[in-house]
Image: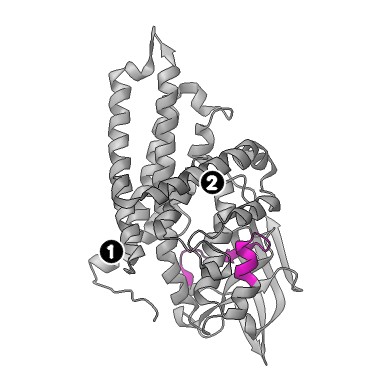
Amino acid sequence: MNKIFFTEEHELFRQSLRAFLNKEVRPNIEQWEADEEIPRSIYKRFGEMGFMGVTYPEKYGGMGLDTFFSVVYTEEMIKMNSSGFNTSIGAHAGLALAHINGEGSEDQKQNYLTPGLAGKRIGCLAITEPSGGSDVASISTKASRDGDHFIINGSKTFISNGVLSDYIVAAVRTGGPGAKGLSMVIIDRETPGVSATKLKKMGWHASDTGEIAFDNVRIPDSQLLGEENKGFFYIMQHFASERLGMALIAVSQAQLALDLAIDYMAEREVFGRTIDKFQVLRHRIAQLSSEVTSARAFVYLLYKQYSEGDYIIKEAAMAKLVTTQLSDKVCYECMRLFGGYGYMESYPMARLLRDSQLGTIGGGTSEVLCEIISKMIIDTKEYKAVI
């Protein structure tokens, strides 16, 4: 299957990235998990190596490579077995910078995208609010016009990089109720009235997750991203790529769980033989591996469609729905293959199982995705790209 989607250049990139991660990331993961954040220095190292902007334009410091280089990137990042680390980098490069690259003016790209790709200015994307998450159209954080400025009041929660980032790409209400009243703005962290509180989590320990409050935060209207009151449509467009990315993360986590379990089974002896010789366990691995391989093929196909410009709202939702549920199942089953050791923090499965759990919640819960999918296949609702 790899020969269908990946070239020799993709595989050379994989080797280069893997060597970098094994040298500069893997030895530090345990410390970053304990610290519950990653150091700013690693963002700069990613920027220096060009790994912060694999598919972003070279004009702003990216590599300008094709979509499947980003697939390779995600797969190798997941092998570090720290969704917190992966999320910290990804929330900046894959979420905040995606909006600036997609909707930002030339000045905004020079001020945020270029230093962002260099790892010198770190961003976060703030959409979810304490009163609601998946219902984006109900966002209540208010941005009131005051001449050529906006005055922002409200709060956001569960924001990756929500405390340590340098700027916030936020969804705010600039118009009336519903989807047509939302806009996207950039808020610098040092702006008076911005405050943040760090949140404790069950998993993703190496990531900084926070709740952000805006108290009469005043920003110039030049910080508006794209057109006023088009924010909902920008968010929906980026949701497709975000959900597809989460599907790839899920199948990569599931594959990592299988790889770890297979290695362990080859070493663990019970009743005079290694447990990879027991038929019931062999068949369990066979079943799970078949499901993961099938899911990966679906995800790769969608990346191919996405790279060709297809608007894959329905398919990305489907992919995230099935792969995140599969990841939870595979990680749980593989944890059990480790026996009692699977429950120990000194073994890799406990963290992998914890980290997997957010897949069915973040970026749209499974229930919300089912509603989106059912509207499209039963009610024949169409979602169209913003031109």
Which colour assignment does the render follow? one colour
In the rendering, which numbered label is found on residue 374?
1
For disc 2, the marked residue is 83
Q: Which residue is at a point 77% across and 74% down the rendered structure image?
A: 192
Residue 260 at x, y percent in the picture: 45, 30
**Residue 305: x %, y % from top left:** 31, 62
352 sits left or right of 189 in the view = left
Q: Is residue 14 left or right of residue 140?
A: left
Distance Cα–Cα, label 1 vs label 2: 30 Å
- Identify the amino acid type marked 1: Ser
Please state which of residues 99 and 332 is positioned toward the viewer in this rendering: 99
Q: Residue 360, position in %: x, y?
A: 43, 51
Residue 326 higher or lower than 146, as above or below: above
The residue at the point 52 percent across, 28 percent down is 343
Kindly identify the residue that appears in the image at 56 percent across and 65 percent down.
Answer: 96
Query: Residue 352: within the magenta?
Result: no
Please provide the residue range marked out in magenta: 112-136
Quadrant in the rendering for residue 144: bottom right
Q: Secondary structure at mark 2?
A: helix
